[in-house]
Image (cartoon, helix red, strand yellow):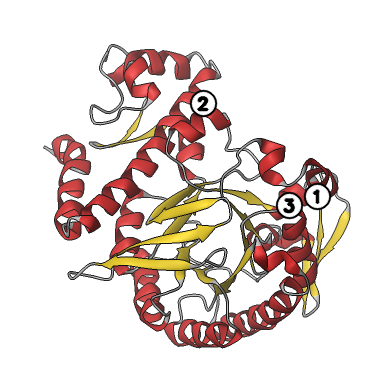
Amino acid sequence: MECGSYQLIKKSSECGARLGKVYTTRGIIDTPVFMPVGTQGTVKGVAIEFLRGSGAQIILANSYHLYLRPGTEVIKKAGGIQKFNSWNSPMLTDSGGFQVFSLRNIRKINEDGVEFQSHIDGSKHFFSPEKSVQVQKDIGADITMCFDECTPYPADYGYAKSSMELSLKWAERCKKEFYKDDSYKTQSLFGIIQGSVYNDLRVRSTMEMLNIGFTGYAMGGLSIGEPKKDMHSVLESILPVIPENKARYLMGVGMPEDLWEGVERGIDMFDCVIPTRNGRNGQVFTSLGKINIRNAEFKEDFSPLDPDCGCPVCTGYSKAYLNHLVRARETLYLSLLSLHNIYFMINLTLKMRKSLENSTFIKSKKEFFEKYYSRDRLSED
């Protein structure tokens, strides 16, 4: 099958949730799937060997960061990103659009592309849609993304419309550049739907992206500060428009509750830095809810982080020991807590896939939240 193509295995009779597979030249990805983020070619604090052990099927890298350092020439000489970082499994690259969006004080956008300054040394660079595609080709990821403008939130209707239209123009140029050579035989290109929280713009963006034609479709410009109800409304307006034989990717979303809500509406793929970023701040996901291991209540708690987790952290260390590492600022905790959070997210999507296989998705979602919020209820009592 074509790289990046999606196969629907089973659809829930209760909601929009679906079980499927995404095909790449380096392996088949079972969906729903959570993709750990390795911005600079590494998932922060987690060695590749441990990442494989977590059950991660695919990870991300960011073309903006890798373009600046170490440079795509180095990665290309190494034989591509998977050989460079020893992952040797499917990878996806962000186009750099979100990073450029976040550099609003040191970038200029026009129809040709974006001029920006490096956050490393202040040097000036220019990303056009063609440049972004070529950078991603050189990096060698299995799934690449169109270069787009990530519309900020809040944005008035006029700005959101012009921003969405610019992303559509760039998408056409990205596709033309992508198919200039044989890259499509080993790589795929996903389109990104924009339009802020305006459902009519989102639907228009979706329809026009479908007319251009991509292997899969991503929802960009969400989870950037808008109310959750607006994100859900956007998903409900556009997911029914996307054909069932196309992968649907919700970019930058990674809280457990958001994964359940996204899958229920028909999302297949997620990514986010939250598991590792929160881990580095001492925040941990468990089946009984979120905890901050730094808190004094865990100083003499010799139980594992999560009684339902079989990761190396939960089977090898107690909350008391992890509390000690955090308070002593021993850097080992950065790796351990990040690793546990990745295991948690990977196992969460595994739980979802099993519930879809067994036709119990809504029941499993309810059971998950009853347990996940039980700690909060106890503290309220």
How far apart in space, not on screen, are marks 2 and 1 (Cα)? 27 Å
* Front position in the image: 184 or 163: 184
Kindly report the distance in space between the C-alpha atoms of the residues bearing marks 2 and 3: 26 Å
Q: Residues within 10 Å of mark 3 (few under 14, many from 20)?
A: many
Identified by mark 3, the residue type is: Ile
Tag 1: amino acid = Thr
- Residue type for callout 2: Ser
Could you say where residue 143 lies in the image, as x and y percent from the top left?
A: 60, 60
Q: Callout 1 environment at 10 Å: few (<14), some (14 to 19), or many (20+)?
A: many
Residue at label 1? 72
Tell me the residue that label 2 is attached to.
335
Residue 282 appearing in the image: no
Q: Position of residue 349 (x, y in %)?
A: 34, 49
Query: In the rendering, at what x and y percent does residue 271 appear?
Result: 49, 53
The quadrant of the image that shows the C terminus is: top left
Q: Is residue 46 left or right of residue 317?
A: right
Secondary element under disc 1, as helix, strand or loop, is helix
Q: Residue furthest front?
A: 1
Identify the residue at horizontal 66%, vertical 43% (top origin). Answer: 82
Residues at circles 1 and 3 in contact by the CB criterion of under 8 Å: yes
- Residue 249 visible (yes or no): yes
Mark 2 or mark 1: name the one nearer the start of the chain: 1
